[in-house]
Image (cartoon, rainbow, N blue to C red):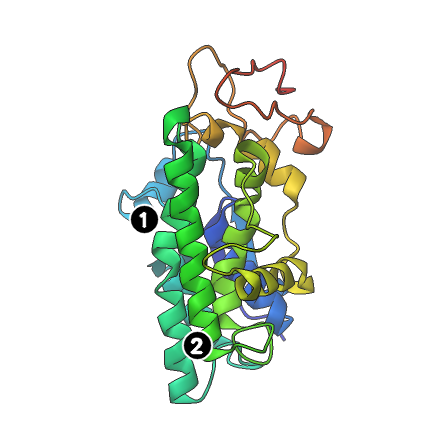
Amino acid sequence: MTAPAKLIVHHIPVCPFSQRLEILLALKGLRNRVDFRVVDITQPRAEWLLKKTRGTTALPILETPEGRILKESLVILQYLEDVFPQPAVAQADPYRRAVENMMTRLEGEFCTQGYVFVMNQNPERREALREGMLKQYARLNDFLMEHAPDGTYLFEDFGWAETVFTPFFMRFWFLEYYEDFDLPHEPPHEPPYERVRRWRDACLAHPAAQQVSKEEIVKLYYDYAKGAGNGALLPGRQRSSFVFEPDWRGRPWPPKDKYGHSATDEELGL
């Protein structure tokens, strides 16, 4: 019997929106049911890909065996949940599903705040951006205290909300490295962060969410820390920190001082 055609996802390997899809499939034990095809973010999008996306460049996109295209990671995430319903990751109970959807709605501002923070080039804005990031964590802490004060995850297990947020918890390792940001550990501090810290740390450690490492994030996102996203080249540089070669594992760790020094290609091992 001929094996059924696979779904195809065109993606950037280190992209948090792609990692969501990989986490969902890992939770289901179905990673091999989708063909992930890598797109080089440092090069202009190929004409064949732009034809599929009708000119848009955002990734990931999903391509069905019939050639239909789906965009937006949360849309694709729901599609994969519907196509591969067992084991379920989203909650089946309508109220519980609504609760995790409410939490998912908090992701947009959380993501935006973290990326604005890391891309900031003005040292005088650091404290305000740090406070803005803490407010985002405080919102999550408050939500968890309302709906799951004594647990680890939002519900009993790592599920839909964790799949949505964990890639950003991992990307925000760049805030730890380049901005010395972390949640306060010692009391007194207001508001409290103990509940969201417990959730974040459990998400980071979950076996289904180990597609990337802190070293990979810090090295590849150096250009973001200097204000250049999506493979853009910084002044004086010939190569993006997102290039595939040389492999990130063989590169030196970038300088932590993003405000006082701009590393060369040579310093970055490019």
Say which of marks 1 and 2 sits in front. Answer: 2
Q: Nearer the viewer, residue 95 or 35?
A: 95
Q: Is residue 241 visible?
A: yes
User: Looking at the rendered structure, which numbered label has been put on residue 30?
Assistant: none
For residue 205, side relative to residue 74 (left or right): right
Image coords of residue 229 (percent x, y):
41, 32
- Please name the residue shown 52% across and 74% down the image: 154
Q: Residue furthest front?
A: 188
Which amino acid type corresponds to the residue marked 2 in the rendered image? Glu
> What is the distance, in whole Å, between disc 1 and disc 2 at their CAs?
41 Å
Q: Which residue is mark 1?
A: 53
Which amino acid type corresponds to the residue marked 1 in the rendered image? Thr
Q: Is residue 156 above or below residue 76?
A: below
Label 1: element kind: helix
For residue 192, side relative to residue 177 (left or right): left
Label 2: element kind: helix
Q: Is residue 146 above or below residue 205?
A: below
Q: Is residue 241 above or below residue 58?
A: above
Q: Which residue is mark 2?
A: 146
| Label 2 CA crowd tier, 10 Å (few <14, some 14–19, many 20+) | few
- Please name the residue shown 64% across and 64% down the image: 202
Number of marks in picture: 2
Q: Is residue 61 visible?
A: no
Q: Which quarter of the rendered picture does the N terminus lie within?
A: bottom right
